[in-house]
Image (cartoon, grey):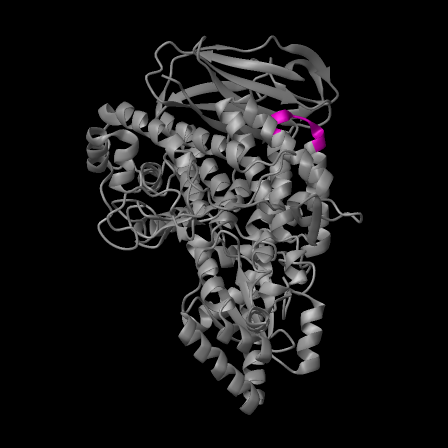
Amino acid sequence: MRTVFWLLVALFTMSIVITSYGALAAPNERLSKSASPYLRLHADDLVQWYTWGDEAFDKARTLSKPLLVSFGYTACHWCHVMQETHFRQPEISNFINENFIPVLVDRERRTALDETYMLVTEVLTQSGGWPNTVFLTPELKPFYGTGYIPPEPFLQLIEAITQGWSDNRPDLLAEGDRLAGLLANYQNRSEEAKAITPEALSKLSQELVASFDPVYGGLGQAPKFFQPTVLMFLLQRYERDDDLAALEAVEKTLVSVQSGGIHDQLEGGFHRYAVDPAWRIPHFEKMLYDQAQMTEVYLEAYRLTGNRKYAGTARKTLDYVLADLTAPDGGFYSTRDADSEGEEGTYYVWTPEELEEVLGTDKAIEAVNLFDLISDGEFAGKIILNLDNVADIQLQDVLAIFEKLKPARNQRQKPRRDEKILTSWNGMMIASFATGAAILGEEKYQNAAIKAGEFLWQNMRTANRGLFKSFFESEADVEAELEDYGQLARAYIYLFDLTRENIWLERANALKEEMLENFSDPKAGDFYATSGSAGFARTKLRSDIDQPSGNGAALDVLARLAKRTSDAQATLVTEKALASLSGIAMKGKSSGASILSAADRHLRSENGPVQYAGNGNVRVSGEYQGKSRQIRLKVTVAEGWHVNANKPLEDHLIATEFKLNAGNNPVKAETAYPKPLVKTLSFNANPVAVLEHEFEITASAEALDVQVVEATLDVQTCSDEICLLPETLKFRIPVSQ
């Protein structure tokens, strides 16, 4: 009987424990059945989370309780910390459940909502980051926000807010009204249009370069983010105006990044940001958007300089994405976590003892001397692999060390992968693979871009001419936002440029039309972030943060399509959007880089390996043929149009002319033009010599002692009825040595 008695006591005690940890006994079905991997991670929290939606809002209004909204994402280290120390701690969790309507948001699935409410925290605390906790009235108006704070201060905060809601609710409601109005007015503000002239862009470039770290590159000191839209803007300034200071700032950044610990030296890919000026100690999460954007930056730097190390880094990153972040059906997964085995960086960091176990004593000592021990901070006494102190003569030995470390690291527990597929991030990655295929000539990158592009079109389209934002476990959901339309349309333009298949341009145009219908502000000319309200208001997001703003992506699409079509309406829409965005972009400097790059592309000319003339009726791509040592331009002219031959028979006609330069010096080259067609046009009684359909122009040069050559093509596009203005296309083409 005593045994039975004590068994009953034990069961009773267990029932009390389970009750106090109620979520552990009954996982939260709202979260466990969610299409968000991040929300699923929190299904066993003690906090009884709601998802963002009417159920939570109605509950808040019915019970007259404030909402506690926590924004986070799967790869977020401090989100995991807060989950363990706050949301699975009985005292804090019970208090939240009793006094708030708690809502958990995957920020990657609700971008506009996240950015809007992050602004609350930044305004109130002068800092931001995730997890972001924002307190809202039942009408979704914010009255306070905070980033991560430790458990005890957090408990004191929510106790104070609860007391304030009880004793001074009118004041908190008034604060919600004030903040909501302030933020909505700020995000939707208008600025006087500015002329985006070459001189204005040059001045802005100088100001940005002055803000770069003169030793390691990158903006500011620490923490250090890539800010790829700024890097691309500066590379554009170099290509346009030979701005050597802009190129130097970018190259200093790229060299430091590719040799630093922020670059995964074993598998490839980039971590999210560095906590030190030298890019050596990263925050270890890997984001798809960083892989996409930084690959494009390295490819662009290779195209402009011919530095093959940049091409190598781009290849390594694309190969990493293929190996680790590519779904079987072709889409790209979102992230790799920073944490494994309960700690940040465990998968990536080495101790001297671990190196000795894999390499042996002598090689381990050599490795420690090469890589250096971290001197202080969380990783003091440990090693993060880098090439900072590795000379070229040592590189092969170091690469041999890396090859031995790879299988050892593969035995470790790998950080969690978030396998949702996001439209905007996939759009960026498709564009990156397409660029890799065009510049590096790799068929596998073209295949990956096409497969992903087809996957998104088949799986992310809604039944009524729209897009979904997220795809997980065979199901798409969440209404797409401006950035999704912009980035996917941009990706399809890149696929059109790569393949010359009209289906991609047709899809890009369809998305552009839907973008105009669902997001444009007809009066102002720019775009809202969402088709309806996101929280307390419908706002416009026009600042680049870790990726281009939705308006930056939209303007880029409009500018590119205007160059590829003869649709005059497309040009008018582009110019109206540019007028609306120009003042904000010029004032924002680094935060307006994507808008300024798109504006420059529209106002001057295209840049890149594929360019267009004659309102999209002439397509030209440039490449270097190593075996024949030829620079080759491939030209496609639309049906019903032509360009003049190199010798057009009449002096007043503009000849098609191909020239090579190395630096500012002309290159002597033997240029071969195709045989022209002689015909008579309706507006000219005399016969003319023209080039039609598809043809190639080549220039052979025996003494190319440079890494990159500049090719220019002068063309005038004509039909049987009119001739358009002459144009000059400029290409920078890497020359293999």
Q: Is residue 398 visible?
A: yes
Instruction: Say whether residue 377 is magenta.
Output: no
The C terminus sits in image quarter: top left
Q: Report x, y in % for residue 542.
A: 54, 57
* Tally of numbered tags: 0
Image position of 640 with respect to 135: above or below: above
Q: Report x, y in % for residue 161.
A: 51, 82
**Residue displayed at 54% across by 90% down:** 168
Magenta stretch: give its range.
497-503
Residue 186 or 382: which is nearer the viewer?
A: 382
Q: Report x, y in % for residue 239.
A: 42, 35
Image position of 123 with respect to 439: above or below: below
Instruction: Say whether residue 498 is magenta.
Output: yes
Image position of 546 with respect to 443: above or below: below
Image position of 622 with respect to 332: above or below: above
Left or right of residue 304: residue 605: right
Q: Is residue 614 visible?
A: no
Instruction: Give the prevailing secondary structure in the magenta stretch.
Output: helix
